Image (cartoon, rainbow, N blue to C red):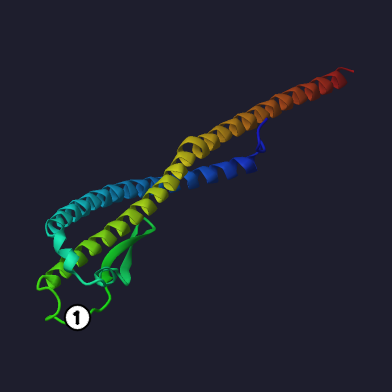
Amino acid sequence: MAKFKLNKEELKKKRDALRQYERFLPTLQLKKQQLQMEILHQINLLKEKKHLYAKKREVILNWAGLLGEAPQDLKAWLTPENVITSTRNIAGVDLPVFTRVEFPFVEYDLFLMPLWLDSALDMLKDLATLREEISVLQRGIGILKQELRITTQRVNLFEKVKIPETKDAIRLIKIFIGDQMANAVGLAKIAKNKIGQTVLEEVQV
């Protein structure tokens, strides 16, 4: 049994709804395409950053033995105080964008510390910065994939459910109204014939 009324008012509602669905669907499809392209771009960027991280880490490992002479506070010096990000809007989604890392300010006696410490700190800070950038990229990709999943569900809902169901409802209502009109015309003819027959009989009497 139909879940909608079979009348002209309902037909108008269904036609209006169909126009809205067909107008909104291209916007959703465009958003889906934009999200897919951005995810691909972000994944490629993530691969580049991971490759750069691996290369820098390999360089550092070559002289990792020297770190035994480093101050005990070295780890604290290399722990970011703040990771600064901005946002970029992609297809209505706020995507985190890595800006920079802030490390604690460190003062130490250059005469008491190993000569290589400045260079080591710079390289290790670069590595820590890359690690944070990779983390922000991964978080952004996760946000984009979640939004893509929701958008894809909506596209499928409109394409495979709402639009076909509404078109089918319009077809059924039009058939019903057409049948009602045909029946009304038929009944009118019968009534007209009966009236004509009655008049004829009265004239003959």
User: Is residue 37 placed above or below 176 in the rendered structure?
Assistant: below
Q: Is residue 118 above or below residue 64?
A: below
Q: Quadrant of the C terminus?
A: top right
Q: How many marks?
A: 1
Identify the residue at image location x=54%, y=37%: 166
Residue 182, compared with residue 25, is above or below; it is above
> Left or right: where does residue 198 sit relative to residue 192?
right
Give x and y (percent) for residue 110. 13, 80
What kind of residue is marked 1? Tyr
Most distant residue in the left direction: 115
Quarter of the figure with residue 98: bottom left
Quadrant of image for the N terminus: top right
Q: Residue at x 27, y 68 (%)?
A: 75
Front residue (pair 46, 130): 130
Please tell me how crowded label 1 is: few (under 14), some (14-19), or many (20+) other residues with Cα within 10 Å: few
Q: Nearer the viewer, residue 200 or 165?
A: 165
Q: Looking at the image, which residue sits at the far right?
A: 205
Please state the horizontal and vertical placement of residue 164, each as a whole percent of the image.
50, 34
| Callout 1 secondary element | loop
Residue placed under numbered mark 1 in the picture = 108
Q: Quadrant of residue 152?
A: top left
- Residue 193 placement, left or right of 112: right
Q: Position of residue 153 (x, y in %)?
A: 46, 42
- Residue 4's spot in the image, x, y percent? 65, 38
Q: Residue at x 18, y 51 (%)?
A: 51
